[in-house]
Amino acid sequence: MKIEGIMPALVSPLNSDETVNLSVLQNLIEYFLQKGANGFYLAGATGEGLAINPDQRRLLAERAVETVKDRVPCIVQVASTDFGEVLRLAKHAESIGAHAISSTPPIFFRYDEDDVYQYYKRLSDAVHIPIMIYNSPLAGFPITPAFAARMFEIDNVTSIKWTSSDYFGLMQLKELTQGEMTVMNGPDEMLLMGLSAGADGGIGTTYNFMLTHYLSVYGAFRDGNMEKAKNAQDKITAIIAALRTLKGCPSIPATKALLEEVGFAVGDAAFPMKKLSSEKKRELVNVLTEAGWNREL
Protein backbone atom coordinates (compact mmCIF):
# COMPACT_ATOMS: atom_id res chain seq x y z
CA MET A 1 0.00 0.00 0.00
CA LYS A 2 1.66 3.18 -1.22
CA ILE A 3 2.04 6.26 0.95
CA GLU A 4 0.83 9.21 -1.11
CA GLY A 5 -1.90 11.78 -1.32
CA ILE A 6 -3.58 13.71 1.48
CA MET A 7 -3.19 12.39 5.02
CA PRO A 8 -4.43 14.25 8.09
CA ALA A 9 -1.96 14.44 10.96
CA LEU A 10 -4.85 13.30 13.09
CA VAL A 11 -5.67 14.97 16.39
CA SER A 12 -5.95 12.65 19.39
CA PRO A 13 -9.43 12.95 20.93
CA LEU A 14 -8.96 13.15 24.70
CA ASN A 15 -11.26 12.77 27.66
CA SER A 16 -10.93 15.11 30.64
CA ASP A 17 -8.52 12.66 32.30
CA GLU A 18 -6.40 12.62 29.11
CA THR A 19 -7.30 9.09 28.14
CA VAL A 20 -8.08 8.66 24.46
CA ASN A 21 -11.73 8.95 23.51
CA LEU A 22 -11.85 5.87 21.31
CA SER A 23 -15.41 6.29 20.05
CA VAL A 24 -14.76 9.84 18.85
CA LEU A 25 -11.50 8.68 17.26
CA GLN A 26 -13.39 6.02 15.34
CA ASN A 27 -16.08 8.46 14.20
CA LEU A 28 -13.49 11.01 13.09
CA ILE A 29 -11.59 8.44 11.04
CA GLU A 30 -14.76 7.21 9.35
CA TYR A 31 -15.75 10.78 8.53
CA PHE A 32 -12.40 11.55 6.93
CA LEU A 33 -12.44 8.28 5.00
CA GLN A 34 -15.82 9.22 3.55
CA LYS A 35 -14.38 12.59 2.56
CA GLY A 36 -11.53 10.85 0.71
CA ALA A 37 -8.52 10.92 3.04
CA ASN A 38 -5.65 8.86 1.61
CA GLY A 39 -4.25 7.81 4.99
CA PHE A 40 -3.62 8.89 8.57
CA TYR A 41 -0.58 10.02 10.55
CA LEU A 42 -1.16 9.06 14.19
CA ALA A 43 0.32 10.42 17.43
CA GLY A 44 2.56 12.92 15.70
CA ALA A 45 3.00 16.52 16.84
CA THR A 46 -0.64 17.32 16.06
CA GLY A 47 -1.68 14.07 17.74
CA GLU A 48 0.32 15.05 20.85
CA GLY A 49 2.10 11.70 20.90
CA LEU A 50 4.95 12.90 23.10
CA ALA A 51 2.45 14.27 25.66
CA ILE A 52 0.23 11.20 25.91
CA ASN A 53 0.77 8.20 28.16
CA PRO A 54 2.41 5.38 26.12
CA ASP A 55 -0.38 2.93 26.99
CA GLN A 56 -2.89 5.42 25.61
CA ARG A 57 -0.78 5.80 22.48
CA ARG A 58 -1.05 2.05 22.00
CA LEU A 59 -4.82 2.11 22.47
CA LEU A 60 -5.11 4.96 19.98
CA ALA A 61 -3.05 3.06 17.39
CA GLU A 62 -5.02 -0.13 17.93
CA ARG A 63 -8.42 1.52 17.48
CA ALA A 64 -7.27 3.55 14.48
CA VAL A 65 -5.82 0.56 12.64
CA GLU A 66 -8.86 -1.54 13.52
CA THR A 67 -11.20 1.17 12.22
CA VAL A 68 -9.31 1.76 8.98
CA LYS A 69 -9.25 -1.96 8.14
CA ASP A 70 -6.52 -1.64 5.50
CA ARG A 71 -8.52 0.84 3.42
CA VAL A 72 -5.66 3.36 3.56
CA PRO A 73 -2.23 3.44 5.23
CA CYS A 74 -1.94 4.17 8.95
CA ILE A 75 1.43 5.61 9.98
CA VAL A 76 2.11 5.46 13.72
CA GLN A 77 4.55 8.02 15.13
CA VAL A 78 6.69 6.35 17.83
CA ALA A 79 9.16 8.99 19.03
CA SER A 80 9.93 9.17 22.75
CA THR A 81 12.75 10.44 24.95
CA ASP A 82 13.25 6.80 26.00
CA PHE A 83 14.62 4.70 23.13
CA GLY A 84 13.37 1.54 24.80
CA GLU A 85 9.87 2.99 24.60
CA VAL A 86 10.45 3.88 20.95
CA LEU A 87 11.16 0.21 20.23
CA ARG A 88 8.16 -0.97 22.24
CA LEU A 89 5.84 1.42 20.42
CA ALA A 90 7.33 0.42 17.07
CA LYS A 91 6.95 -3.30 17.68
CA HIS A 92 3.42 -2.77 18.93
CA ALA A 93 2.53 -0.80 15.79
CA GLU A 94 3.85 -3.61 13.64
CA SER A 95 1.97 -6.25 15.66
CA ILE A 96 -1.42 -4.55 15.18
CA GLY A 97 -1.02 -4.15 11.43
CA ALA A 98 0.09 -0.54 11.02
CA HIS A 99 1.34 0.12 7.52
CA ALA A 100 4.36 2.11 8.69
CA ILE A 101 5.96 3.85 11.64
CA SER A 102 7.51 7.27 11.87
CA SER A 103 9.85 9.04 14.23
CA THR A 104 11.59 12.33 14.66
CA PRO A 105 15.32 12.13 15.29
CA PRO A 106 16.14 11.83 19.01
CA ILE A 107 15.22 15.09 20.72
CA PHE A 108 16.51 17.59 23.32
CA PHE A 109 20.17 16.54 23.58
CA ARG A 110 22.73 17.38 20.91
CA TYR A 111 23.38 14.56 18.46
CA ASP A 112 25.51 14.36 15.34
CA GLU A 113 24.68 12.59 12.09
CA ASP A 114 26.27 9.32 13.17
CA ASP A 115 24.12 9.30 16.31
CA VAL A 116 20.95 9.93 14.33
CA TYR A 117 21.90 7.38 11.68
CA GLN A 118 22.35 4.73 14.38
CA TYR A 119 18.99 5.70 15.88
CA TYR A 120 17.17 4.91 12.65
CA LYS A 121 19.35 1.85 12.01
CA ARG A 122 18.45 0.36 15.41
CA LEU A 123 14.80 1.20 14.82
CA SER A 124 14.93 -0.49 11.42
CA ASP A 125 16.52 -3.60 12.92
CA ALA A 126 13.61 -3.91 15.37
CA VAL A 127 10.74 -4.02 12.85
CA HIS A 128 9.92 -5.23 9.37
CA ILE A 129 7.52 -2.48 8.24
CA PRO A 130 8.34 0.79 6.44
CA ILE A 131 9.81 3.69 8.40
CA MET A 132 9.12 7.35 7.69
CA ILE A 133 11.73 9.84 8.90
CA TYR A 134 10.07 12.88 10.47
CA ASN A 135 12.09 15.95 9.50
CA SER A 136 10.73 18.62 11.82
CA PRO A 137 12.37 21.78 13.19
CA LEU A 138 10.71 20.93 16.52
CA ALA A 139 13.13 18.01 16.90
CA GLY A 140 16.09 20.36 16.83
CA PHE A 141 18.09 18.33 14.31
CA PRO A 142 18.12 19.63 10.72
CA ILE A 143 18.13 16.82 8.18
CA THR A 144 19.91 17.72 4.96
CA PRO A 145 19.02 16.13 1.61
CA ALA A 146 22.36 14.31 1.55
CA PHE A 147 21.83 12.87 5.04
CA ALA A 148 18.25 11.86 4.25
CA ALA A 149 19.51 10.07 1.14
CA ARG A 150 22.10 8.29 3.26
CA MET A 151 19.43 7.11 5.68
CA PHE A 152 17.29 5.96 2.74
CA GLU A 153 19.88 3.20 2.30
CA ILE A 154 18.84 1.73 5.69
CA ASP A 155 16.52 -1.25 5.36
CA ASN A 156 12.86 -0.28 5.85
CA VAL A 157 13.48 3.49 5.61
CA THR A 158 11.26 4.36 2.66
CA SER A 159 9.93 7.87 3.20
CA ILE A 160 10.27 11.22 4.91
CA LYS A 161 7.84 13.83 6.20
CA TRP A 162 9.47 17.03 4.94
CA THR A 163 8.34 19.76 7.34
CA SER A 164 10.59 22.38 5.85
CA SER A 165 10.28 25.30 3.45
CA ASP A 166 13.50 24.21 1.73
CA TYR A 167 11.96 23.03 -1.52
CA PHE A 168 15.25 23.12 -3.35
CA GLY A 169 16.36 20.58 -0.75
CA LEU A 170 13.28 18.48 -1.45
CA MET A 171 14.14 18.46 -5.15
CA GLN A 172 17.72 17.52 -4.34
CA LEU A 173 16.53 14.64 -2.16
CA LYS A 174 14.35 13.29 -4.94
CA GLU A 175 17.30 13.47 -7.32
CA LEU A 176 19.70 11.85 -4.86
CA THR A 177 17.33 8.90 -4.38
CA GLN A 178 16.40 8.62 -8.08
CA GLY A 179 12.85 9.55 -7.19
CA GLU A 180 12.44 6.40 -5.12
CA MET A 181 12.17 7.94 -1.64
CA THR A 182 8.60 8.96 -0.84
CA VAL A 183 8.45 12.58 0.33
CA MET A 184 5.37 13.95 2.08
CA ASN A 185 5.05 17.72 2.31
CA GLY A 186 4.79 19.16 5.82
CA PRO A 187 4.03 22.92 5.67
CA ASP A 188 0.28 23.13 5.08
CA GLU A 189 0.38 26.61 3.59
CA MET A 190 2.80 25.39 0.91
CA LEU A 191 1.34 22.06 -0.20
CA LEU A 192 1.17 23.09 -3.84
CA MET A 193 4.79 24.23 -3.75
CA GLY A 194 5.79 20.90 -2.25
CA LEU A 195 3.90 18.94 -4.90
CA SER A 196 5.51 21.06 -7.62
CA ALA A 197 8.94 20.26 -6.14
CA GLY A 198 8.22 16.53 -6.29
CA ALA A 199 6.40 15.65 -3.06
CA ASP A 200 4.14 12.60 -3.26
CA GLY A 201 1.45 14.16 -1.08
CA GLY A 202 1.09 15.94 2.21
CA ILE A 203 0.58 15.36 5.93
CA GLY A 204 -0.68 18.27 8.00
CA THR A 205 -2.46 19.70 11.01
CA THR A 206 -5.02 21.88 9.28
CA TYR A 207 -6.12 18.92 7.14
CA ASN A 208 -8.25 18.12 10.21
CA PHE A 209 -10.53 21.08 9.58
CA MET A 210 -10.30 21.72 5.83
CA LEU A 211 -9.54 18.34 4.29
CA THR A 212 -11.65 18.96 1.19
CA HIS A 213 -9.52 21.99 0.22
CA TYR A 214 -6.34 19.89 0.42
CA LEU A 215 -7.93 17.10 -1.60
CA SER A 216 -8.82 19.74 -4.21
CA VAL A 217 -5.21 20.96 -4.39
CA TYR A 218 -3.89 17.42 -4.77
CA GLY A 219 -6.53 16.28 -7.25
CA ALA A 220 -6.18 19.35 -9.46
CA PHE A 221 -2.39 19.10 -9.40
CA ARG A 222 -2.53 15.44 -10.42
CA ASP A 223 -4.91 16.38 -13.24
CA GLY A 224 -2.54 19.09 -14.44
CA ASN A 225 -4.99 21.88 -13.64
CA MET A 226 -2.65 24.32 -11.94
CA GLU A 227 -5.14 27.19 -11.91
CA LYS A 228 -7.65 25.11 -9.94
CA ALA A 229 -4.89 23.83 -7.66
CA LYS A 230 -3.69 27.36 -6.94
CA ASN A 231 -7.23 28.58 -6.25
CA ALA A 232 -7.69 25.82 -3.69
CA GLN A 233 -4.29 26.56 -2.14
CA ASP A 234 -5.16 30.26 -1.95
CA LYS A 235 -8.29 29.41 0.07
CA ILE A 236 -6.16 27.36 2.47
CA THR A 237 -3.57 30.10 2.79
CA ALA A 238 -6.21 32.73 3.58
CA ILE A 239 -7.62 30.61 6.40
CA ILE A 240 -4.18 29.83 7.84
CA ALA A 241 -3.22 33.50 7.64
CA ALA A 242 -6.38 34.39 9.56
CA LEU A 243 -5.59 31.77 12.20
CA ARG A 244 -2.13 33.26 12.68
CA THR A 245 -3.60 36.68 13.47
CA LEU A 246 -5.26 35.30 16.60
CA LYS A 247 -3.22 35.75 19.75
CA GLY A 248 -3.38 33.03 22.39
CA CYS A 249 -4.71 30.47 19.93
CA PRO A 250 -2.09 27.77 19.22
CA SER A 251 -2.68 25.39 16.32
CA ILE A 252 -3.57 22.23 18.28
CA PRO A 253 -6.16 23.80 20.63
CA ALA A 254 -7.53 25.74 17.64
CA THR A 255 -7.82 22.60 15.52
CA LYS A 256 -9.60 20.76 18.32
CA ALA A 257 -11.96 23.70 18.85
CA LEU A 258 -12.91 23.75 15.17
CA LEU A 259 -13.58 20.01 15.19
CA GLU A 260 -15.77 20.47 18.26
CA GLU A 261 -17.62 23.21 16.40
CA VAL A 262 -18.74 20.66 13.80
CA GLY A 263 -19.68 17.99 16.33
CA PHE A 264 -16.57 15.94 17.14
CA ALA A 265 -15.96 15.99 20.91
CA VAL A 266 -12.17 15.77 20.66
CA GLY A 267 -11.61 17.56 23.97
CA ASP A 268 -8.79 19.88 24.97
CA ALA A 269 -5.09 19.56 24.29
CA ALA A 270 -3.04 17.66 26.87
CA PHE A 271 -1.72 19.57 29.88
CA PRO A 272 0.03 21.99 30.04
CA MET A 273 -1.05 23.25 26.62
CA LYS A 274 -3.50 26.12 26.63
CA LYS A 275 -7.24 25.48 26.92
CA LEU A 276 -9.27 27.96 24.91
CA SER A 277 -12.06 29.86 26.62
CA SER A 278 -15.55 29.83 25.12
CA GLU A 279 -15.00 33.46 24.11
CA LYS A 280 -11.74 32.62 22.32
CA LYS A 281 -13.42 29.71 20.55
CA ARG A 282 -16.19 32.00 19.28
CA GLU A 283 -13.60 34.49 18.07
CA LEU A 284 -11.69 31.68 16.33
CA VAL A 285 -14.78 30.42 14.52
CA ASN A 286 -15.88 33.93 13.51
CA VAL A 287 -12.47 34.99 12.20
CA LEU A 288 -11.91 31.80 10.21
CA THR A 289 -15.45 31.78 8.84
CA GLU A 290 -14.91 35.31 7.60
CA ALA A 291 -11.69 34.09 5.94
CA GLY A 292 -13.58 31.36 4.10
CA TRP A 293 -13.67 28.37 6.44
CA ASN A 294 -16.81 26.24 6.35
CA ARG A 295 -18.12 23.49 8.62
CA GLU A 296 -18.03 20.80 5.94
CA LEU A 297 -14.29 20.36 6.63
Image: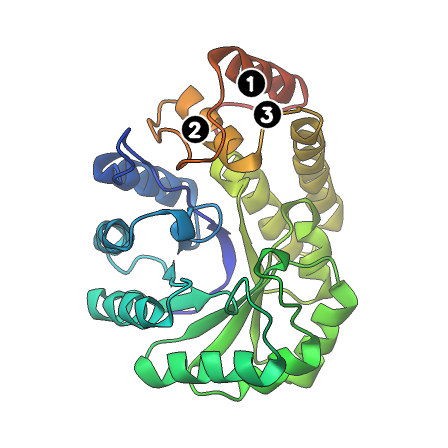
Q: Are marks 3 and 2 in contact (CB under 8 Å)?
A: no
Q: Secondary structure at mark 1?
A: helix
Estimate the x, y position of residue 275 in percent, counting from the top left: 46, 25
Residue 143 drawn at (x, y percent): 65, 72
Nearer-the-camera pick, 69 or 245: 245
Distance between mark 3 and mark 1 Cα atoms: 8 Å
* Left or right of 92 on screen, residue 168: right
Query: Measured from the top left, where is residue 91 in percent x and y?
Result: 26, 72
- Residue name at image x 70 percent, y 37 percent: 237
Count how many numbered circles sit on residues in the image: 3
Which residue was labeled with disc 1? 285
Amino acid type at mark 1 = Val
Q: Residue at x 60, y 70 (%)?
A: 110
Query: Could you say which disc has been placed on residue 259 in the image?
Result: 2
Say which residue appears at 70% left-offset and 69% top-offset: 170
Residue type, numbered disc 3: Trp
Q: Nearer the viewer, residue 103 or 29?
A: 103
